Image (cartoon, rainbow, N blue to C red):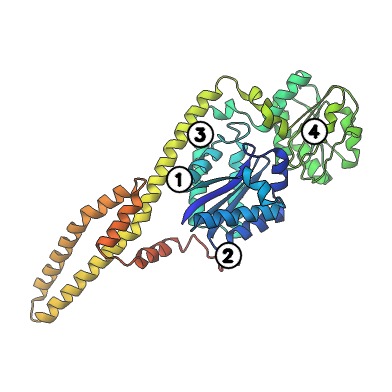
Amino acid sequence: MSVLVVGLSHRTAPVALLERVSVSGDALVKLLHDVQQDDHVAEAMVVSSCNRVEIYAEVDRFHAAVTGVSQLLSTHSGVPMEQLASHLYVHYEDRAVEHLFSVGSGLDSMVVGEGQILGQVRSALRLAQEEGTVGSTLNELVQQSLRVGKRSHTETGIDRAGASLVGVGLTLAERALGPIQGKRALVVGAGSMSALTAATLQRTGVTDIVVINRTHDRAVRLAQTVGGRAAEFGDLTAELAEADLVISCTGATDVVITPDMLTPRAMFLLDLALPHDVDPAVRRLPGVTLINLESMQDGAIVAATDDGGLAEAVTAVRGIVADEVSAYLSAERAARVTPTVVALRSKAAQVVEAELGRLVSRVPEIDGRVRDEVTQTVRRVVDKLLHEPTVRVKQLAESPAGDHYAEALRELFNLDPKVPDAVRRVETVDTKPSKREAGL
């Protein structure tokens, strides 16, 4: 089994396409199960955020799995494969591990170093665990990617060099409006991104914060956490007329803010939603500035985040990722050879017991003390003979071609390949639910 990644992101696809492919809620759960039920997939996890949709899978066939997973992404999004294919990227085995560690460290984010991706990966893993679509392979890999991401942020300045989407948006807002302290801010939506936005505004020194949401109770709860005020969703147009800074991130499938709801004046709108919350046509209104994910993708983000320390931080994080990938792959390759070593020692033990049994049948009068001494001597001889090759094969297994050494060991000693497989099953039975056990 090997790890496969199939996905698209802000690096390979326009925002309009990402909007169509992005999944959440019940649709995300359905995609997760459909991927895991593919004949060539054992485990599955889906990361779906505002600038990436990625499917992580443990697979037994590369080409067949790529075809199946890609087709499922096309089917669920409604985007024809011929339109989707040119925007997809595929990572396999070592490259899949490197990609996930880079994603978790913020190297692959639209805003380099942003920390939200760690929460998104963690949420994706939690959902897959709850739905029973991950086992030991993806669980261990993703947990390690979270540790690598945390280490990258702790040991380098990448989280300071590359702020979050919200932080960068507020930087751009100050360029358009001047200092935002003293401005009225309107937060449209009450989800996790809106909560982050409200908290960031408060830390920045904005004291006049209004939160508006279709579910008013959620707006009230969020507003209370930042000392702001909640407004009814029906008053959106009136609140827009009083706001200087608007940050919108709802789960709506259609635009929430249109040109006819705004008056031409100095006003900054930050649209962090996918699909868009704000009609891009508002840019035609005098004085109105709109920044959305697409405009960030086009380069505004670079100018807002490169404070001179970014390049140094990125270099440091890349070094951490390279070291962690190497360590992970070495440990994983060493673990692969363990069942073969167990099979070899098991076969040796069987040979010893058979020969000792034959000795007893041929010389039944042998003294019990002598028999015990012979038994211990034979076992010590076998252990010493096996010690060096088993230690060496574990060491050699950590190299990129390590699997070949285990294969050579099985061939030289005529080991039953089913024995290592049985050992693997025993090792993972408590952590890797079968599709039947997962209720699929």
Q: Which secondary structure, mark 1?
A: helix
Instruction: Classify residue 282 by image quadrant.
Output: top right
- Measure the C-alpha gap from mark 3 to mark 4: 34 Å
Q: Residue 314 location, x and y as percent?
A: 52, 28
Disc number at residue 438? 2
Disc number at residue 94? 1
Which residue is labeled 3 in the image? 152
Can residue 174 be seen in this snapshot? Answer: yes
Q: Which secondary structure, mark 4?
A: loop
In primary-sequence order, the first of circles 1 and 2 is 1
Q: Which secondary structure, mark 3?
A: helix
If the image is split into quadrants, where does the C terminus sit? bottom right
Which residue is labeled 4 in the image? 228
| Eye-nearest disc, 1 or 2 | 1
Instruction: Classify residue 43 by image quadrant.
Output: bottom right
Residue at 13%, 70% in the rendered image: 372
- Measure the C-alpha gap from mark 3 to mark 2: 34 Å
| Eye-nearest disc, 1 or 4 | 1
Q: Are marks 1 and 4 in contact (CB under 8 Å)?
A: no
Q: Residue furthest front?
A: 82
Disc number at residue 388? none
Crowdedness near tag 4: few (<14), some (14–19) or many (≥20) residues, C-alpha within 10 Å: many
Amino acid residing under circle 3: Ser
Amino acid residing under circle 1: Asp
Residue at 63%, 60% in the rendered image: 34
- Measure the C-alpha gap from mark 1 to mark 2: 28 Å
- Measure the C-alpha gap from mark 4 to mark 2: 44 Å
In primary-sequence order, the first of circles 4 and 2 is 4
